Image: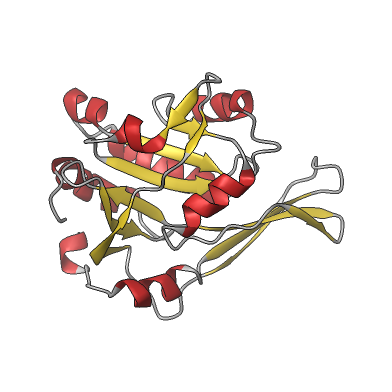
């Protein structure tokens, strides 16, 4: 459980470490071939999560949800336990695995807890991940997940405030490659601040153990 693994980090040290974890995923020449994935992990880290001593402020972003409506992230998630992840639907492994782990863990919660929790997936590839495409993809994971798309510059700036690096998708050697941080940030319903970070190695068991505490705004 996280309580046996948590550590305190100064914000500056965290920012330096968080930027190291990127996932590179690519598609074929015409975006139809099976994509490839290369993941670089934080050196020497065997922790599933980090409890921050200086929590992050929630990104000030107004994007578009899967119904085509504007979604003010701060307003819509105010006072609610919230998990935020930046990724994209064409990612072959890291993104769907992360979202699936959270979705499976969520099923262990009571209905009231599930209704209180907000899971937000922000695309790093808004050109391909239209609201419709996001909605269709999330149906197979958890239809309650909030999928957000919009202006790439806005998304990139929002991620940067959380120490998460994302780059615009680009073609390299005939493949579409997208680089993005793989962290999940948990925000407290009490303070609306992001105080827990999960790395890509977080398992279903990690989320299952921690979600009830995160929903209460307590430290896992």
Residue 83 visible:
yes
Q: Residue at x 46, y 79 (%)?
A: 43
Does residue 64 appear to the left or right of 116 in the view shown?
right
Nearer to me, 170 or 94: 170
Q: Quadrant of the N terminus?
A: bottom left
Residue 168 rendering spot, x and y as whole percentages = 68, 53
Residue 140 rendering spot, x and y as whole percentages = 51, 27
Does residue 188 appear to the left or right of 59 in the view shown?
left
Q: Residue at x 59, y 26 (%)?
A: 131
Res 82 → quadrant? top left
Nearer to me, 103 or 65: 65
How many numbered discs, if any? 0
Residue 199 rendering spot, x and y as whole percentages = 39, 61
Nearer to me, 42 or 52: 52
Q: Residue at x 16, y 67 (%)?
A: 4
Does residue 141 appear to the left or right of 14 in the view shown?
right
Picture colour scheme:
secondary structure
Residue 15 in the image: above or below residue 201: below
Residue 213 in the image: above or below residue 52: above
Residue 176 rendering spot, x and y as whole percentages = 77, 52
Does residue 30 appear to the left or right of 177 in the view shown?
right
Residue 131 in the image: above or below residue 56: above
Q: Residue at x 26, y 51 (%)?
A: 193
Res 68 → quadrant? top right
Q: Quadrant of the C terminus?
A: bottom left
View extreme (bottom): residue: 44
């Amino acid at each position: 459980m996280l309580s046996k693994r948590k550590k305190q980090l100064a914000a500056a040290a965290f920012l330096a470490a968080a930027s190291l974890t990127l996932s590179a995923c690519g598609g074929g020449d015409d975006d139809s071939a099976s994509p490839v994935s290369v993941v670089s992990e934080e050196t020497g880290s065997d922790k599933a999560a980090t409890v921050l001593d200086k929590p992050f402020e929630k990104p000030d972003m107004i994007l578009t949800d899967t119904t085509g409506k504007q979604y003010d992230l701060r307003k819509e998630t105010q006072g609610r336990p919230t998990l935020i992840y930046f990724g994209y639907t064409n990612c072959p492994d890291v993104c769907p695995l992360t979202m699936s782990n959270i979705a499976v863990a969520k099923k262990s919660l009571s209905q009231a807890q599930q209704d209180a929790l907000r899971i937000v997936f922000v695309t790093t590839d808004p050109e391909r991940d239209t609201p419709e495409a996001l909605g269709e993809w999330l149906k197979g994971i958890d239809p309650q997940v909030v999928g957000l798309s919009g202006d790439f510059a806005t998304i990139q700036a929002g991620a940067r405030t959380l120490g998460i690096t994302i780059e615009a998708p680009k073609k390299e050697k005939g493949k579409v490659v997208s680089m993005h941080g793989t962290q999940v940030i948990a925000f407290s319903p009490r303070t609306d601040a992001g105080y827990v970070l999960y790395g890509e190695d977080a398992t279903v068991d990690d989320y299952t153990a921690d979600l009830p505490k995160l929903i209460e705004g307590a430290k896992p």
